[in-house]
């Protein structure tokens, strides 16, 4: 059933209903070379199945919000999430995983987590507004009660960690520091933060556009508000609880670690940077902040935000249980919070942009061609090896490929079944395709493999071809990926 997302300012006597598409305000400006590279990147990731085609879907991906991913994009996203998670839970002891719901119907909720985004059904809104026998004040009250009963959508993952602080604090025997990590989807209104002129709906005038209907008015008046759609973002969150005297040092520690992590997977590490958040940009609860940036062809965008948030959110969440905050060392101060919030969707786009290399070359007829390669890090590459067929008996070669594919699958090495191609394709054309997919290696099984067990392996990064025994391929790939992990 289709749901509308409503942004409602419940504490005030105003309501803003959001519906139609938000217009992206960031311009793709800069040098023409950067624009060309940006267009090339977007066309490539659509053509090679990283994201689903369609202008609207590409726009979502450009914004750094959750879009419809294709097979390669889904695998790449899982790899990024896995590595992000490893970096959080593997780098420090006492980091706990939680999983909280993305919506809640509870009326007794701290607004900081859920914002004012609510799920409402169009028919329900229509029924409330069609109660013509109600006075203006009664109608406003009816709408407010209706919205208060509607499920809330979370806008961040921080409050989920705050909710579970007390039981986990007991679990670690009331010792600091420790952390709570979570990944999941959050929902946000228009990113430019402005609803537009006339978008406020006050107690004197209520205006809604239910799907397929004209504007609903009160007393014949319509303010024609600007409607915005919700955006869905995949967040990675670590909430680190520490003593007040060490919170600043922990913020510096995590800022260094996070920049190091982003650069680990980069082809051009200098494109990733960090800087302090200005006082004007800081959240109200934060005393300090750091942002991790990536330099896209169209400009700099934030990938992660780190904040030193003090103890006020924790005290607000757990009123009346201050005694449970005291650590075993006798300190009566409340734990301070250092938060890390990463945009996984934008991070995915950053790694794709950073890995793209364009090489111009001439063919034998002196025609200029552009070789496009996604040199994704071996740990992130969605496909590690493509299995292709050379000359020989097709049926027997396919059987060999199927056996090798199964062996690689059991070893958890992702392989592309190029041997299933139904029409003959020149090897050079296949190599170009696999380079654009970011495939690390291409292994060609031929008649020679049937006779001697030897196959040819081509490297994406060097284009060098070498011969090895089919029994060595699994170990070769495992060692290569492991070596990349340890760099």
Image: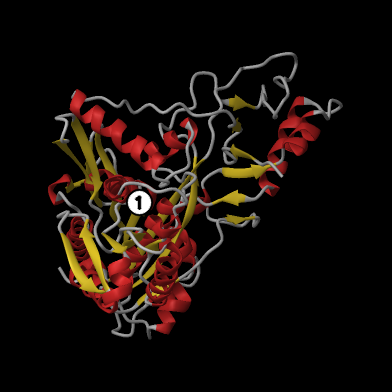
- Indicate the quadrant where residue 212 lies: top right
- 47 sits left or right of 102 in the view: left
Asked which quadrant contains residue 365, the reply is: top left
Observer-nearest of 202 and 456: 456
The residue at the point 47 percent across, 51 percent down is: 422
The answer to whether residue 92 of the structure is visible from this angle is: no
Vertical comparison of 134 with 118: above or below: above
Element on which disc 1 rests: loop
With 90 as the anchor, is 120 left or right in this view? right
Q: Position of residue 189 (x, y in %)?
A: 49, 38
Q: Is residue 231 above or below residue 169?
A: above
Q: Nearer the viewer, residue 111 or 62?
A: 62
Q: What's the image's color scheme?
A: secondary structure
Q: Residues within 10 Å of mark 1 (few under 14, many from 20)?
A: few
Judged left or right of residue 191, residue 226 is right
The N terminus lies in quadrant:
top right
| Residue where numbered disc 1 is placed | 285
Question: Which residue sits at x=48%, y=53%?
Answer: 185
Relative image position of residue 243 (x, y in whole percent): 27, 71
Q: Is residue 396 visible?
A: yes
Query: Where is residue 429 drawn, in percent x and y?
Result: 30, 44
Q: Is residue 160 above or below residue 193?
A: below
For the residue pair 182 and 251, the one nearer the viewer reads as: 182
> What x and y, as percent, mark residue 97?
43, 72
């Amino acid at each position: 059933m289709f749901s509308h997302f409503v942004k409602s300012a419940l504490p005030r006597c105003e309501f803003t209903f959001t519906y139609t598409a938000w217009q992206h305000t960031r311009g793709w400006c800069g040098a023409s070379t950067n624009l060309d590279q940006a267009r090339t990147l977007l066309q490539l990731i659509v053509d090679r199945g990283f994201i689903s085609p369609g202008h609207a879907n590409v726009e979502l991906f450009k914004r750094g919000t959750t879009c419809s991913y294709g097979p390669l994009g889904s695998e790449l996203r899982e790899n990024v999430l896995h590595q992000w998670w490893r970096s959080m839970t593997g780098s420090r002891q006492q980091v706990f995983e939680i999983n909280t719901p993305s919506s809640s119907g509870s009326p007794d909720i701290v607004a900081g987590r859920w914002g004012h985004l609510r799920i409402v059904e169009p028919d329900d809104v229509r029924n409330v507004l069609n109660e013509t026998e109600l006075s203006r004040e009664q109608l406003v009250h009816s709408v407010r009660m209706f919205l208060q009963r509607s499920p809330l959508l979370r806008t961040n993952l921080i409050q989920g960690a705050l909710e579970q602080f007390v039981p986990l604090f007991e679990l670690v025997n009331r010792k600091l520091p420790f952390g709570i990590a979570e990944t999941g989807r959050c929902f946000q209104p228009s990113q430019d933060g402005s609803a537009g002129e006339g978008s406020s709906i006050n107690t004197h005038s209520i205006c809604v556009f239910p799907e397929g209907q004209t504007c609903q008015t009160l007393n014949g008046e319509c303010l024609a508000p600007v409607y915005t759609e919700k955006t869905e973002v995949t967040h990675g969150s670590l909430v680190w609880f520490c003593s007040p005297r060490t919170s600043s040092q922990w913020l510096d520690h995590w800022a260094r670690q996070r920049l190091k992590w982003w650069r680990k997977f980069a082809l051009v590490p200098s494109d990733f940077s960090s800087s302090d958040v200005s006082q004007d940009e800081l959240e109200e609860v934060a005393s300090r902040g750091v942002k991790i940036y990536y330099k896209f062809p169209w400009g700099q965008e934030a990938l992660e935000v780190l904040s030193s948030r003090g103890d006020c959110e924790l005290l607000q969440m757990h009123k009346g249980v201050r005694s449970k905050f005291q650590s075993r060392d006798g300190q009566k101060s409340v734990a301070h919070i250092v938060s890390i919030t990463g945009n996984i969707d934008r991070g995915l786009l950053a790694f794709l942009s950073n890995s793209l290399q364009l090489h111009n070359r001439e063919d034998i007829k002196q025609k200029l061609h552009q070789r496009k390669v996604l040199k994704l890090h071996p740990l992130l590459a969605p496909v590690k090896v493509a299995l292709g067929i050379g000359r020989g008996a097709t049926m027997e070669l396919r059987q060999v490929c199927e056996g090798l594919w199964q062996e690689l699958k059991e070893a958890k090495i992702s392989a592309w079944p190029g041997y299933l191609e139904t029409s003959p394709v020149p090897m050079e054309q296949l190599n170009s395709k696999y380079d654009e997919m970011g495939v690390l290696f291409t292994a060609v099984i031929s008649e020679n493999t049937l006779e001697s067990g030897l196959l040819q392996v081509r490297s994406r990064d060097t284009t060098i071809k070498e011969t090895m025994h089919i029994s060595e391929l699994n170990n070769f790939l495992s060692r290569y990926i492991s070596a990349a992990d340890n760099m």
